[in-house]
Image (cartoon, grey):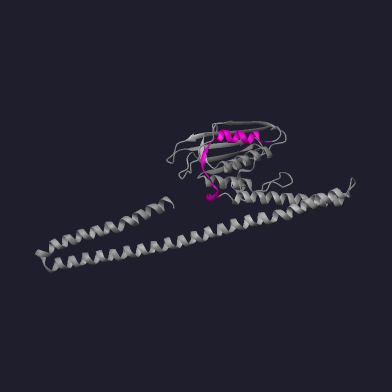
Amino acid sequence: MSDRERYLRRVERLAVPLMAGACLILLIAAALLAAPVGIAGGLAMAGAMAGLAGLVVLHERARRRAETRRAALERDNAVLMQENEDLRVFVSATTHDLHEPLRKIQVFGDRLRDRMGLMPDPDALRCLERMTDAATRLRDLLDALKIHVRIDSRNTAYEPLDLDELVADILSARTGPVPGTIEVSGLAPIEADRAQLRILFENLIDNALKYRRPDANVHIRISGRTETDSGGGRIVIEITDNGIGFDNRHSERIFGLLERLHARDAYPGAGVGLATCRKIARQHGGSISARGESGQGACFTLILPLQQANLSYMPLAAGG
């Protein structure tokens, strides 16, 4: 609801009581005038009573309209929630049921490759590789969609979380050396879902590494700062890189589900990661945005509350 709508609703709530009060004052005045004036006082009293009755009728009509709108909104919300639940169940069932045939495609593809021997037919091998690559891409897409659809309030458990420790753990778990430097500073402890925040930072760090420039070493900077607000404070985190960047006109498009700015052959991926990042940020009452410049790198800005209003407290493990 906008500020203007809230203002108009407050005015509507106050208008009827104020008008009723004015009529009541008029009614009292008419009663005082009735004794000496006689018929004129009676007419004034009758007019005031009629006005007051009219206001009561108007107030009742407004109340009924508000109740009708509220009931319609509740019905629409219930329908929307059911549709979202149906979609979640559909995606979950689909991703589960499709994994088995995809696994068989890959298994039998490997067997065919083994039977081709040391000197396989080039055309047959190319067709086989395209088939198994497509199966692998579809499997990766299903895995990404399964993660995306599971981001909701039922699968979110807030707990005290050390972001410095989380990011350090993500970087140490990477296989192979990072072709450049990654700087981390200013990350404060927050209340969040550990698994979801891990997915979010993994996606952002992987993107920065994947979309690097071939003529330069990677330089990634993850920096945070805390700010005060009426909700207990927030942390603003910027993930900046010196990669290939993107046209800033696409700064919103890249967060769309299954959106890609580059050809699949050039940069592999399912086109789901950034959409999942935004969903996680919103699930935590925060936001994520991006800005970029082609050939000059990108910067993702993540804003998260330091505290969750409905925190289900889980103490940090020893040393955590």
Queried whether the magenta region covers residue 282, the answer comes back as: no
On the image, the x and y values in percent for residue 66 come to 39, 61
Identified at 34% across, 54% down, the residue is 11
Residue 241 appears in view: no
Range of residues picked out in magenta? 152-174
Left or right relative to 69: residue 37: left
Left or right relative to 279: residue 126: right
Identified at 81% across, 49% down, the residue is 110
Queried whether the magenta region covers residue 173, the answer comes back as: yes
Residue nearer the viewer, 247 or 201: 201
Q: Residue furthest front?
A: 318
Q: Is residue 30 above or below residue 162?
A: below
Q: Residue furthest bottom?
A: 39
On the image, the x and y values in percent for residue 53 come to 26, 66
Quarter occupied by the C terminus: top right
On the image, the x and y values in percent for residue 302 come to 55, 40
Residue 109 appears in view: yes
Q: Is residue 211 above or below residue 25?
A: above
- Figure disc tally: 0
Left or right relative to 77: residue 206: right
Q: Residue furthest left?
A: 36
On the image, the x and y values in percent for residue 296 come to 65, 36
Identified at 54% across, 44% down, the residue is 281
